[in-house]
Amino acid sequence: MTDIDIICGQGDTQQQLLDWLDSNAGATATENCGTVKWTNDYSGDNSIKCKLGKGIEVNFTAEDECGNSTTVSAIYHIKDLTAPIIATQAQDLTVECDGTGNLTELNNWLSSNGGAIATEECSIMTWSNNFTMLSDDCGETGSATVIFTVKDSCGNPSTTTATFTIEDTQAPNLPNTPSDITYECIGDVPDLGNLTTTDDCSGAITVMGTDAIDNTDPLNIIITRTWTFTDACLNTSSSSQTITVKDTTAPVLNLPPNVTAECSDNLSPIAFGSATATDNCDPNPIITYSDVKTDGPCSGTFKITRTWTATDFSGNSVSADQVISTSDTTAPEFDQATLPADLIVECDNIPTSEVITATDNCGNATVTVNDLRIDGSCPSNYIIARTYTATDDCGLTRTHIQNITVQDTKAPQFVETLPTPSLIVECDAVPVPETLTATDICGTASVTFNEVRTNGNCVNNYKLTRTWTAQDECGLITTHRQIITVQDTTAPVFVEAMPGDITVECDAIPSAVSLSATDNCGTATVTYNDVTTLGICENDYVIARTYTAEDECGLTTTHTQNITVEDTKAPEPATSFAPVLDVSCTNVPEVPNLTFTDNCSSNININFTETNSFDENVYVDYQIIRTWIVTDACNNQATYTQTLNVRLDEIFTEFVAPDTCFNDGIVDLFDFLPHDVNTKGAWEIIEGESSATLTENIFNPTIIKMNEEFRPGIGDILYRFRYTTTDSGCISVNEIVMNLHANCVVLPCGEDQIKISTAVTPNGDGHNDTFDIKGIDLCGFVAEVKIYNRWGALVYESNNYTLGSIDTSGVQGDWDGSSPNGSLGSNGRLPEGTYYYIINLQNSGISPLTGPVYIGTK
């Protein structure tokens, strides 16, 4: 019997139970008289059994057909190993403070397991939690993190966690706030007082009052008075009162009297008095004034309207005017003690007018200057009458005259740096005549230029004399002379890049380069000349090629290019050929007729050789290497080869020899091949009787023994001999076909030649083991044999007596004295004694042969 554990939730527990019941809990029973029927007392109790010790015991009864029974029992357990599955986790809950601790919400949340939902396949579930108390953070708020545990009937637990939180988010209640109000003066505003209020959850409330003053408009000051209420959880509320301060009453002014004065008098309030004022809110209002000037006929006669203004600190103001009248009767005075005196000056040194100033008792005075020119003998000789006039705002004036005599006594001067008086230059560096200008201290000046050339000994050697003359408006002059010596000392210059020294092949000598030259003063021509120096052979030499450039004055420039000519190239084939050929030994091409050319030489030496790796005694592929060594006049040498990879093919020839009798003697196989065949090859028999011998080319068939299959008129032997050698670079395979027969032999097949065994001793010693008939083996006779015992009973019979192997003495039979049915003698053999034979040789013409034969063991 086998107890069973059924795990709840793992498969079909009911089916597992039924399978266990159907199997009789694994019990088996045997019965020697009939069949056995099984029953059990399972009551259908499927309640969960959490421990193996509390399983359900089931009795199984086996009963035979006669009512005999045997009972065994086994226990099955249904085990629950899986905790409930929480399908919905517990949810956090946050509630607002209600002043009583929010017990209702907390109890409902706990009783609902925080909203968690679990499932269980096997049993009922029980929920519990670990709640003890709420933490107290502020006021009547608090929180608690609760673990909810669900267990099945077998105590398998699952947990989920959530937090219950009581919070205070409501600010304190607002009290009655004072109404908005307006005051005339800032001193009328009462002090800030405190307000009280209540809160739904928190007992301690903090009150703070502040004033925010907006005085950007002094006539309308706004005070925002705010009270802020804060509970223990820092929730705040606030209320405000607006206080307006408006000062609408302006100050009262007291003015000084109107007056009349000279324009140069002190016109400030110190001389004519200041205004005073009083105000309802400001004990010290600010008093200011501003003057407005009204001009009269001139700057010294005007009217001042002085406006006085009183302003309190609220910006309320009042204004009133005081009038002051003025007049001007005095001319201006020059400020300088010494005024400009009369002068005599050069025309380039006329002084500018001096800065003269003047002052006036009532206003501004200006000084003007006026020059009057009186001409003299030339444009730069004259007199200037310079008048200074001071004028005030009312037109009153004062004057001063200065006489300046102007004269010109200086010649003009060149402006630019003068050319070097004496200069020596190359003909290509003659400077362009400079353009000179001149200035005069009194007016303009003109410059004239003159150049004179004096030729020398060459077109580019000469002298230039240059003269510049400057004259002013009054006829005064200045001159400058320059002498330039022009000469040509520079040789011409090649235009192109000069050819450098080179080394060339004898068939690549370059032509002279077309060069040109320039000269700094004129034209130049270029010529060249070649000088050759011979070397060690006819195509080795050096060409010294000199290029000469000459200008018009005979100055020259030369350049020499050394051209080294050499012959370094060996001759090359003028005809094409294959360097490598793969050929058969039967088709080796002829040596190609090659011709060669050389880049420089017409005389070419050709040396041809050929090597052949063929070995007539080695049957492998070989090479033929053909070599041409060519040399030119300068001993430049090249080697050209043609390699023939020769395939050692076979040339097969078959020869048919005349039919030959094996008894005619030895045969020289070379007699059947051409007389010029290579005799260093190898012979072999590839077909034919192996008893014949072949020593090199000598075939000896005479040692062949005749038998029933090879005898006169019967059983010719076809021999094929192969001779392998070499011939003309190929493998020569020669085969000789020969028909070997025995017709030259005459067989003795008469009665006198027949020998019959007289005794048979089958003891395995190799002597007389069988009954033999000798002398008929090569005659083709068929022997009918009958053997009788001494009582005339037939003990052996054969219509075609089979002969055994052929030995040196003849042909042996196959009867060894055995009895056909094994009924006589021991081990199936006939007993010792004398027996009688009758032999009939069919188609032999010989009468039946009879006689005794003794069977023994020794």
Image (cartoon, rainbow, N blue to C red):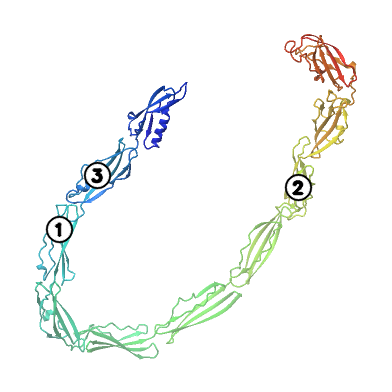
Where does residue 370 sit, x and y in percent of width and height? Answer: 30, 88
- Locate the C terminus by quadrant: top right
Q: Amino acid at mark 3?
A: Ser
Considering depth in this image, is 330 or 262 the residue closer to the camera? Answer: 262
Considering depth in this image, is 421 or 384 the residue closer to the camera? Answer: 384
Q: Nearer the viewer, mark 3 or mark 1?
A: 3
Q: Amino acid at mark 1?
A: Met
Q: What whole-number distance in Å separates the C-alpha atoms at marks 3 and 1?
A: 44 Å
Where does residue 402 sit, x and y in percent of width and height? Answer: 29, 87
Q: What whole-number distance in Å separates the C-alpha atoms at marks 2 and 1?
A: 126 Å
**Left or right of residue 191, residue 719 in this image:** right
Q: Is residue 553 above or below residue 34?
A: below
Considering depth in this image, is 471 or 12 the residue closer to the camera? Answer: 12
Q: Amino acid at mark 2?
A: Trp
Q: What whole-number distance in Å separates the C-alpha atoms at marks 3 and 2?
A: 119 Å
Where does residue 740 sit, x and y in percent of width and height? Answer: 85, 29
Circle 1 sits on which residue? Answer: 208
N-terminal label among 3 and 2: 3
Circle 2 sits on which residue? Answer: 628
Circle 3 sits on which residue? Answer: 111
N-terminal label among 2 and 1: 1
Q: Is residue 128 above or below residue 264?
A: above
Q: Nearer the viewer, mark 2 or mark 1?
A: 1
Indicate the secondary structure of the residue bearing disc 1.
strand
